[in-house]
Amino acid sequence: MKRDLGHNAEQAVARVAHDFHASRLIEKLRGSVGPSFAGADTISAQGAVPVIMTTPLSKFQEAKSALDSIFLGHNRSKRSTNDAVIGFYVDEAANKVIFKILAHGRAQAEDLAKQAGVSASEFGVKIEDEIPTLMSSVRGGDIYHIDSKHAYSVGFSVNGGFISAAHCVKKGINVTDIEGNLLGTAVESSFGGEVDSSYIKTIDGTNLTGYVNSYGQAHFHCGTITAKNVTIDFDFRHPSTGLTETDVCAEPGDSGGSFFSGDQAQGTLSGGSGECARNGPSKKGQQYFPPINKSLEAFNLTLITA
């Protein structure tokens, strides 16, 4: 956190505590306000005051569901063939639907907004320089391997094995450790919709712990959550929804790797843009993960904790 966020030890501890308290407070607000709830955002500026939003969150959630239907295949015929919209999410603080687009994507965003029943004042655009990609690799790595060459990252230990990203391994495929020894077999794998997760059942005698290592392709990197419930079309060929967006960097081979906050698991890496080595000292990027509970519920698994 010192390197990536500029915090000293005291500030880092305070930051984690503040984030935990804020998440609890937002859930209380959601329950007390009811259908008129328009979202909440943490504000650190002195003298900041709450702002009354013009559009309830429920309308934007309905609009996003309609957009998801277009992106995820149910109504894919309605989508423009000139792909320039990378993804979208509801920005609660701005009280808008935000479309993530390439430079030439404004017209397509306007068309999608119209289809979803969103007015011109209820959506915005964010121009991106790169197309998010799935963080798989065909080079050496140090976590687990497929065919002794494809390298991916362990997410978290669960009862009987570990979870990773679904696009890393198909059901029935064996995986090995960095020395080529059999580690386990993928018994579940689901990609698309709200899940990008696989469950690898490890061989008998494997020591499953509740810890996260500090190496991997990109080592530890700290960052912040920049959006939730984001829909992204990786490489314009692999749409996925319900993702959490972060501003951390990653490297090819990090797919399936761990996201955590404090002592809580958050999710496993799907993909994104912004490689650590290429982005220099800032170490910033845009990486996405499905929330951990979605992965656990999909395969009826229990997280192993320390």
Image: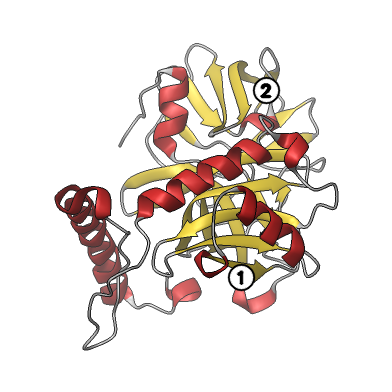
Q: Is mark 1 on a helix, strand or loop?
A: loop
Q: What element carries label 2?
A: strand
Q: Can residue 143 be seen here?
A: no
Furthest residue toward left:
32
Instruction: Point out residue 125 in the picture as x, y percentages from the top left corner.
Output: 62, 68
Q: Which of 100 and 226 is in front in this view?
A: 100
Q: Mark 1 points at which residue?
A: 283
Instruction: Point out residue 282 in the picture as x, y percentages from the top left corner.
Output: 61, 76
Point out the image quarter for the N terminus. Answer: bottom left
Q: Nearer the viewer, residue 161 or 274?
A: 274
Furthest residue toward bottom:
47
Q: Which mark is residue 66?
A: none
Q: In the displayed structure, would residue 164 be above or below residue 189?
A: below
Q: Which amino acid does label 1 sit on?
A: Lys
Q: Residues within 10 Å of mark 1 (few under 14, many from 20)?
A: many
Q: Which of 113 and 202 is in front in this view?
A: 113
Tell me the CA gap for discs 2 and 1. Answer: 30 Å
Instruction: Point out residue 244 in the picture as x, y percentages from the top left corner.
Output: 49, 50
Q: Which of 7 and 100 is in front in this view?
A: 100
Q: Which amino acid does label 2 sit on?
A: Val
Q: Can residue 144 be seen here?
A: yes
Dot 2 or dot 1, earlier in sequence: 2
Residue under the image location 64 percent in, 42 percent down: 255
Furthest residue toward right:
82
Point out the image quarter for the C terminus. Answer: top left
Residue under the image location 26 percent in, 67 percent down: 13
Instruction: Point out residue 200 in the picture as x, y percentages from the top left corner.
Output: 56, 21
Instruction: Please state which of the two labelled residues, at mark 2 or mark 1, is closer to the viewer.
Output: 1
Q: Mark 2 points at which residue?
A: 175
Q: Specify the quadrant of the image occupied by residue 127.
A: bottom right
